[in-house]
Amino acid sequence: MADAAVELVVRSTRVITPEGTRAASVAVAGGKITAVLPHDAEVPAGARLEDFGDDVLLPGLVDTHVHVNDPGRTEWEGFWTATRAAAAGGITTILDMPLNSLPPTTTADNLRVKQEVARAKAHVDVGFWGGALPDNVKDLRPLHDAGVYGFKCFLSPSGVEEFPELDQDQLAASLAEITGFGGLMIVHAEDPHHLDAAPAVPGPKYADFLASRPRDAENTAIGNLIAQAKRLNARVHVLHLSSSDALPLIAAAKAEGVKITVESCPHYLTLTAEEVPDGASEFKCCPPIREAANQDLLWDALADGTIDCIVSDHSPSTADLKTSDFATAWGGISSLQLGLPAIWTEARKRGRTLEDVVRWMSAAPAALAGLTQKGAIEAGRDADFAVLAPEETFTVDPAELHHRNRVTAYAGKTLHGVVKSTWLRGTQIADHGTPTEPTGLLLERQN
């Protein structure tokens, strides 16, 4: 380690690299990892050493599914609070969803509005998705050229009137346009006809809400999406998969060479329908949290690669919108700060490793978005790290969370995995759950 440019060396007996977990020292210069070296490598003169002992050094997590809602609905969430929560939870990069802000990210001009709002508030690096609406096909290429990472659409109502869903013809038109310039479409896949046939029953019973969002709505929408992607040779990504019944369709499509990737979320993988109390709409999300047997199959699909990655779908609202009526309460779960320990708690029970968690929550989301500088501890990548004490536990106290409205489905749960610190390009951005000053950058797609 004789390179005089090295400014920082981070060291641990457990460093998770693409080649596996090992004792190592990681050299950092100019915000980049310059080398991964033996644990006892000499520290250059002038370089600072941070020795994390036996705590695990992970690459910073990449969360490609975050609703920040800023500007326009900042009483729900904002860039300052959302990115503080991300930093406290070991996340160093987020991609912001195009809806729930006003304006939505559906034109290049609207993107610039959002970027200006985010610029001084970002505690972690922030990139942006664009939106595909029935009437904005003409705006998709300009948004792509402006640096968005892809385009989100809904196949059923989104819940906000300024972001309408696409029907199958509109989906085909948008997919054809996006495929023409090599872009990615990310899809909220629930079929509106199945939802219309299973209307929401007012009241507090979770069983009634679950029945209103049947698996067939997801299965049909995903089947239609696969057919469109296959016909157009389009690249598509299924958001927040909940229904295990769709897994054989997805696996078959992947085997045929269809360009499809899939995510799921901590709430589908750690919470079950059987445990949701009636009236507890902090557990409401769309598609819904399903039964334990369904969850087991989602974990199997993570293990075999049918599901590619795990991201939060952090979708907050003000507390007053989380009423006890499941039919009318806002659907969304806030978990930016808790995703890593929630997933690790369940993964360790199921015999999975932290290497698996890093693949699902850092490497794979980075690959999905083409964030080649993120997602791994190896030379040339950004020096983004999370330091985790995986054997330690804590009990979730909403008062200690940093997102704006401290409503959470995880309140009172005891979780394994304490995030000791988070580092962005070699600078510490959170210490034992307390974020520092904002140093995040706004990211734009580079390819």
Image (spheres, grey):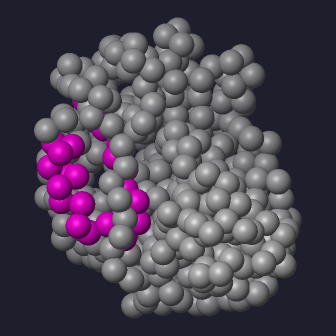
Give me the residue at 34% from left, 80% from top.
437
The answer to whether residue 312 shows anywhere in this view is no
The answer to if 292 sits in the magenta stretch is no
Between residues 213 and 421, which one lies in front from this camera angle?
421
Location of residue 192 in the rendering, given as x and y in whole percent from the top left corner:
37, 32
Location of residue 116 in the rendering, given as x and y in whole percent from the top left corner:
17, 55
Location of residue 128 in the rendering, given as x and y in whole percent from the top left corner:
34, 46
Question: Relative to residue 9, is residue 443 depicted above or below?
Answer: above
Between residues 401 and 108, which one lies in front from this camera angle?
108
Give me the residue at 38% from left, 75% from top.
84
Which residue is outermost to the top? 231
Between residues 324 and 75, which one lies in front from this camera angle?
75
Q: Is residue 145 left or right of residue 16?
A: left
Give me the residue at 40% from left, 60% from top.
125
> Tag count in the figure?
0
Image quadrant containing the C terminus:
top left
Between residues 218 and 379, which one lies in front from this camera angle?
379
Image quadrant containing the N terminus:
bottom right
Find the magenta span and give its range. Answer: 110-133
Q: Is residue 206 left or right of residue 315?
A: right
Question: Relative to residue 183, is residue 106 depicted above or below?
Answer: below
Q: Is residue 126 left or right of residue 267?
A: left
Give me the residue at 79% from left, 49% from top.
303
Name the image quarter holding residue 268. bottom right
Location of residue 189 in the rendering, given as x and y in whole percent from the top left corner:
46, 35
The answer to whether residue 28 shows anywhere in this view is yes
